[in-house]
Image: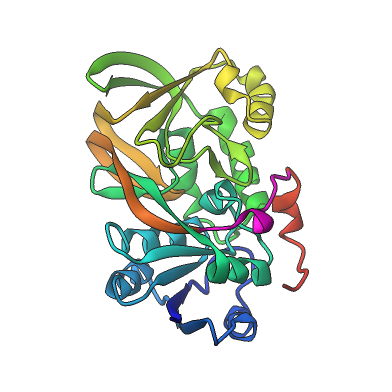
Amino acid sequence: MKKRALYIINPASGIGRQKDIAKLIKNETDNSRLDIEIVFSEYPEHAFELSQNAAGKFDIVVAVGGDGTVNEVGRGLLHSDTALGLLPTGSGNGLARFLQMPFKINKSLDVIKHGNIKLIDVIKVNNYYSLNVAGIGFDAFISHQFAQKKRRGPLAYMQLISKEFPKYKSDHYQIEIDGEAIEIDAFLISFANSSQYGNNFHIAPQARIDDGLIDVCLIKDFPKYTAPALLISLVDQSIDKSKYDKIVKARKVKINHPLPLLGHVDGEPVNLGRKVDIEIMPLALKVVIPPIHLRQTSNILQPLMEMIPLGI
């Protein structure tokens, strides 16, 4: 019996790989195995609306874009029998990298045809949902700043970080983690479902996406001169060994703050207010993952290689 797949394309996502994506999808699809429809999102949250309407009507709904598109499409499929598929064409692709999705379009389409279905957790942050990583502090501040920029892509993101890092000051937080109260001066606090933000920067190296737990990553205030070492530890997956990092696995987290908090959810800026409630939603979403022979092995240079147009 043929499966039905809906492709939701975000034409504004990523670093210019969207131009002929619909044509590639049509040319690479085996019509004897898969009936497909292709739609384009036209405004913020449109991908969520399209996905929500498709839940239960299609076997797979595929997010064609970056982390923001994946978040919108995935939210529309929560607790449904329809699986989320990924065609990673964004600039970070955090969840796709964690799931070892291939980045060539034809191989990604093979995953949609031949992939396995996996149930994954989802993190709820107030009224928002994170499939990958959410947070407050410096990364949230950068997310809000980056949303105002016209230039996209990893290089523009790193330039913004380089500009803002010397000026950023850590904040004081009162946190309750599974009922235990702590206070901390933190540079950032991440709530990780998978191990990485995107672009192979790993904030929670031991995170599992189906363990029913949030990896709460508390990066303490640190001397600015230690930043290069911390950056390297994000890349080589050793941040959890730093004396400035504490990772706690939890089911529920509460934060009270005297001022409204800026946050990010899968890289997208959100306003969280003075009270933040974070909890895990175990196995709330079906995702199509690659079989062993199609898995993309981790490569530190991969994000830069993706910026070079190499066809499919």
| Quarter of the figure with residue 96 | bottom right
Residue under the point 65% across and 45% down: 159
Residue 239 drawn in magenta: no
Residue drawn at point x = 31 percent, y = 64 percent? 81
Q: Name the residue nearer the viewer: 38 or 57.
A: 57
Secondary structure, magenta segment, majority class: loop
- In this rendering, position of residue 263 left or right of residue 101: left
Q: Quadrant of the N terminus?
A: bottom left
Percent position of residue 283, x then y: 33, 47
Give the magenta range: 289-299
Residue 206 image position (x, y, % from top left): 52, 29
- In this view, 134 is above or below 5: above
Residue 295, compared with residue 62, is above or below; it is above
Q: Find residue 205 and report its horizontal and vertical position in percent.
A: 56, 31
Q: Is residue 44 above or below residue 38?
A: above
Comparing 101 with 306, the one in front is 101
